Image (cartoon, rainbow, N blue to C red):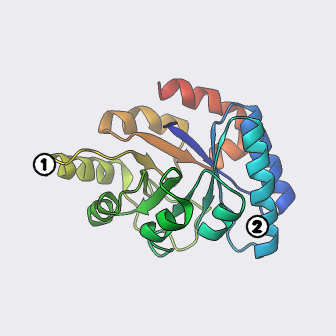
Amino acid sequence: MEKLQYISQGFTIEDQELNIRKAIDNGIKWIQVRWKNAPENELIKLCEISKKICSDNQTLCIINDHIHIAKMVDADGVHLGLKDEKIAAARQILGKHKIIGGTANTLEDILQRIDEKCDYIGLGPLRFTSTKEQLSPILGFEGYEKIIEELKSKSLEIPKIFAIGGVVLNDIELLQQIGIYGAAVSGQITNQPSIINEFKIAMQ
C-alpha cells in the first residue's frame, strides 16, 4: 500500500481537477477525492473525471464519504469518517477487493476500526487544519505516540495508520519513528505539488 495520499482541495470543480492533475503530474499515486459541501451532481462529475485521470496514470482513486458514488464511478475505494456510513455497509456495496479506510481520533476509535477490518486508518488531526470543519481534538505527536504505545501494550498488531490533519514534510521522520505507516496530505501538496517527491524520499 502506498504511504502517501493526496486529499484533494478546491472550491470549484475546475480547482479540484487542476489540483488533482498537478499532484499526479508530480508523481502522486493515491488520490482521495474530497469536496465537502459540493452539489451532488458536481461531485459525481468530479469523481468521474478523477477516476479517469487516475486510471490513465496508474493512480489509486478513493472517494471521501460517499459509498454510492465510489460504486458508481468504480473508484478503488472509499474513506469514511466516524459519523459516515458503516464500514460493513461499504464492504457489502463495494466488494472485498476495494480499499476501505476509516477515520479515527482516539484509541477507542482505532480499536473500533481494527474490529471493523478497515484496510487503513486515518488518525488525526496532528495539528489544526483549516481544511476541516468541526475539527476533532488535536492529537499532536504525543497523542500518536501514546496510541501506538497502548496498542503495543495490548499486544495488538499495529494497523496501517496514516497521519492526517495539517501534516507537512518536516513531520514525516518523527511520525515514522513513532510507528505511523503513512500520511494523507492536503494543504502542502496543493500549494506546492513539486514537494511530493521529497515526501516519497522521506517515506522510503
> Is 199 located above or below residue 99 in the figure?
above
Indicate which disc residue 50 carries: none
Query: Dividing the picture into quarters, in which one does residue 63 lie?
Result: bottom right
- Tell me the residue at 83%/61% (across/down): 13
Instruction: Report the amino acid beneath label 1.
Output: Ser
Query: Dividing the picture into quarters, in which one does residue 74 lie?
Result: bottom right
- In this view of the protein, can residue 68 be seen by the observer? yes
Q: Residue 37: image x %, image y %?
A: 70, 74
Q: Which residue is mark 2?
A: 43
Along the viewing direction, whichever of 52 and 156 lies nearer the viewer:
52
User: Disc 1 versus disc 2: distance between alpha carbons?
Assistant: 43 Å
Q: Is residue 65 left or right of residue 37?
A: left
- Tell me the residue at 74%/50% (across/down): 51
Indicate which disc residue 153 carries: 1
- The residue positioned farthest toward the right in the image shown: 14
Q: Residues within 10 Å of mark 1 (few under 14, many from 20)?
A: few
Return the disc, 1 or 2, that comes first in the chain's sequence: 2
Query: Dividing the picture into quarters, in which one does residue 24 lie?
Result: top right
Q: Is residue 84 left or right of residue 161?
A: right
